Image (cartoon, rainbow, N blue to C red):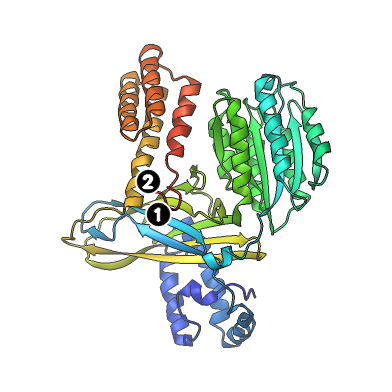
Amino acid sequence: MDASLNLYAIFGIPPDATQDDIREAYRVAARRFHPDANPNEGADIQFRDIASAYEVLGNPALRADYDAARRRYLDEPNFFSLRVTPSKRVLSMLPEPQVVYLLAEVTSMRQTAQQRTQEARLNLALVLDHSTSMKGDRLDKVKIAAQQIIEQLTTDDVLSIVSFGDRADVLIPATRVTDKTSMRAMVNMIRADGGTEIFHGLLAGVKECERHLGSKLVNHVILITDGRTFGDEEKCLELAEQAGAKGIAISAMGIGDEWNDTFLDALASTTGGSSSFINSPSAVVRFLNDRVRSLGAAFAERLQLSVAPDADVTLESVFKLMPNPQPVDIHPQPIPIGALEINRPLAVLIQLQMPPSSKAGFRTFVRLDITGDVLAADRQRYKVLSDISIEIAENPVPEEPPLAILDALGKLTLYRMQQKAEDSVKRGDVVEATRRLENLATRLLAVGREDLAQMAMVEARRVSKTSALSEEGRKALKFGTRMLLALPQPGEDR
């Protein structure tokens, strides 16, 4: 029995609820989420928690034991909170499905966040591509970035560095950062040679990270590559699943235009990491330093999201907005969504399809469950829940979506416009692709992104003449429009 878990919160009832209250809460939850009644994957996952909670609370003797053990957690602070903002609070009665968006924001609670006196401790593995194509400025900048990271880390941090081409070399086995001079010297010895076989490097990096795996640490692998791996993508993705299950996240950074962005996106989203496009060697240092600083700002790690729609509601997509915009797979659940930083929220945008409605009144339609490990408190699987309801009305008063959702949807539209243009190119529909890119350029100009607008126009002209996008332009538009989705920092205008 895990007394740290608030079983009463799972049912949405107070600790002094009667046994009849508990039975009724269980019946209501079972009607909504039991696998026989609800085919949604998130419902199945959440019902397991509901059933386990009822096994305890539904038995007076077990409940008494739980309540006694639970007393030690009654003064426990709230570590993080979940705020959910729907795009609409009232839906019209319509004979066709309707889309509802939810902006879910997880925020560290101020009083507990202020208790943290130092940055999060890192268990970091750098996996660096040293293939022949990295020769010159690319590898030089990667080495400079790695050496700067060594300087940033403290003796409380663990670092390992792996370089790979046709095979992997563990340059620095996982160890505390005490002898920075020797570590910098080892990095300086990296030479460009061989092909690109990511699996060998990634496997070595994950193994090094596993050596110091800890619940109070940020366990993270950062992969930097400039090429496509040779025939081992599936093995890499399987390894990422295994790493994610152990609490190791993987972030991937692609340099130039020859790497497989779909593959690196999948590699990162499987573990709650992020993927990035580095369009020039000079940007490597900034990108890598920013990523490590972000890891050091972690308040809670290994956050997972479970979305349990009611049986007649469909989960369509989840897009992480902050701290690093990233599309995420909605299967399997729970969905890894990464780390919560101390001074900015973790935010995701959830798209749901509501069924046709013929009955007025209030109804539930989805429940969100987020768990994560609070680092400084060494509090594992801390859980927050939110059960969302909506009103159905025959003639609702017109309402504007909240500004934060309106802003996110406007930027998500830009990201999806470039995706649709790319799809049109793949289908061979040159006219449609050109039109979409020209429209994208217009929209990008309207939001003040002249650089991306110019790139969209260049690609539109290229497509009209050659029926193809350039790899550099395609990646620049994909990752450029994705980064627009980051919500403003506290104090900025929304």
Viewer-closest of 353 and 446: 446
Q: State the separation of the CA atoms marked 2 and 1.
A: 9 Å
Relative image position of residue 329 (x, y in whole percent) = 50, 45
Q: For this view, does 15 lie left or right of residue 447?
A: right
In the image, residue 452 above or below residue 300: above
Name the element at disc 1: strand
Which residue bears the numbered disc 2? 408
Q: Quadrant of the N terminus?
A: bottom right
Decide: marks 2, 1 in contact (CB < 8 A)?
Answer: yes
Q: Amino acid at mark 1?
A: Leu
Q: For this view, does 153 lie left or right of residue 364?
A: right
Sequence-first tag of 2 and 1: 1
Query: Mark number for residue 103?
Result: 1
Viewer-closest of 112 and 435: 112
The image quadrant that residue 434 belongs to is top left
Viewer-closest of 418 and 172: 172
